[in-house]
Structures are given as C-alpha cells and as structure tokens.
Image (tube, rainbow, N blue to C red):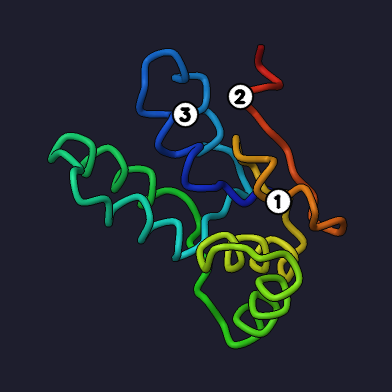
Amino acid sequence: MKLIDSNIIIYSAKEEYAFLKGLFKEENVFVSEITRLEVLGFHRITEEQQEYFNSIFSIVNILQISPGIIEAAIKLRRAHNLSVGDSIISATANVHDLTLYTNNVDDFKNILDLKIFNPIKANK
C-alpha cells in the first residue's frame, strides 16, 4: 500500500516522468489531504495543471488528517525537525502502515520506522 508524496504528483505532469501516472491507477494508493493542499495550493498553478491534478485526486484515496495523525506528526516534528507538511505526510504513512513514495528521500531518512520508496530513482 502506497502513500504518494506531493512531488511525485507534480513530477507526473512532466513528459519525462509520465511513467508515474501508472501509480495512480493501482489499487491501495493513497494521498494525504495535506498533499492535496500542497499541490493545488501552489500560487502559480495553471488552469491546465489544476485540471490534471484534480483528475488524480478524483481517483486516488485521500486520507483525512485525524487527531492520531496530528499526535504522531507532533512527535516526528519535534524529533526530526521536519516541516509541518513532511511531519503530517510521514505520520500518515506510519499511522496507516503505508510505504511513502517520494523523490525527497533525504527529507525523511532519519525516520527509521518509515518505509520509503523512490519510484523515480527505481525507474532509472
């Protein structure tokens, strides 16, 4: 089961990373609500990008940010000096026992119990 990070969704819009689009059609693929905020909340998003990203969010499972995720995120943020977004993403993956698919592996490398996979590096 996979939790897709914002950067994977953004990369998938580029032609050279089109192979990432297949991830969104698989079963047991999730994104955090914070990912939706990060992707769609970009201040220079174009109408075409917004349409593409919304099509992804319409087919993947979106996980809400629960009190349990917030508690786990607080602990991770304190322990690893993470951004708010990264602490929620990593907490969501851990709480739901998901593998985080990200190109930003270094942002999460100190969280030893977090399962991480880089689909971009794996495809090279």
Task: Report which quarter residue 15 is drawn in.
Answer: top left
Task: Report which quarter residue 13 is drawn in.
Answer: top left
- Of badges 3 and 2, nearer the viewer stands 2
Q: Give how far across and how far down residue 86 sits, in percent.
A: 57, 59
Q: Give the distance between the C-alpha atoms of the residues marked 1 and 2, in whole angstroms.
A: 16 Å
Q: Which residue is label 3 attached to?
A: 21
Q: Amino acid at mark 3?
A: Lys
Q: Residue at x 65, y 80 (%)?
A: 74
Side of 108 relative to 62 (left or right):
right
Q: Give how far across and how far down residue 103 sits, in percent.
A: 60, 35
Q: Give how far across and how far down residue 63 sits, in percent.
A: 53, 67
Q: Amino acid at mark 2?
A: Ile
Q: Are marks 3 and 2 in contact (CB under 8 Å)?
A: no
Q: Give the distance between the C-alpha atoms of the residues marked 3 and 2, in whole angstroms.
A: 12 Å
Q: Are marks 1 and 2 in contact (CB under 8 Å)?
A: no
Front position in the image: 5 or 61: 5
Q: Earlier in the sequence, mark 1 or mark 2?
A: 1
Which secondary structure lies at badge 3?
helix
Q: Give how far across and how far down residue 122 sits, in percent.
A: 71, 21
Q: Residue at x 68, y 32 (%)?
A: 118
Q: Amino acid at mark 1?
A: Phe
Side of 61 relative to 104 (left or right):
left
Query: In the rendering, which numbered label is found on residue 120?
Result: 2
Disc 2 crowd, CA 10 A, few/some/many (<14, 14-19, 20+): some
Q: Earlier in the sequence, mark 3 or mark 2?
A: 3
Q: Give the distance between the C-alpha atoms of the residues marked 3 and 1, in whole angstroms.
A: 23 Å
Q: Which residue is label 1 attached to?
A: 108
Q: Residue at x 51, y 63 (%)?
A: 85
Side of 48 relative to 70 (left or right):
left
Which secondary structure lies at badge 1?
helix
Disc 1 crowd, CA 10 A, few/some/many (<14, 14-19, 20+): some
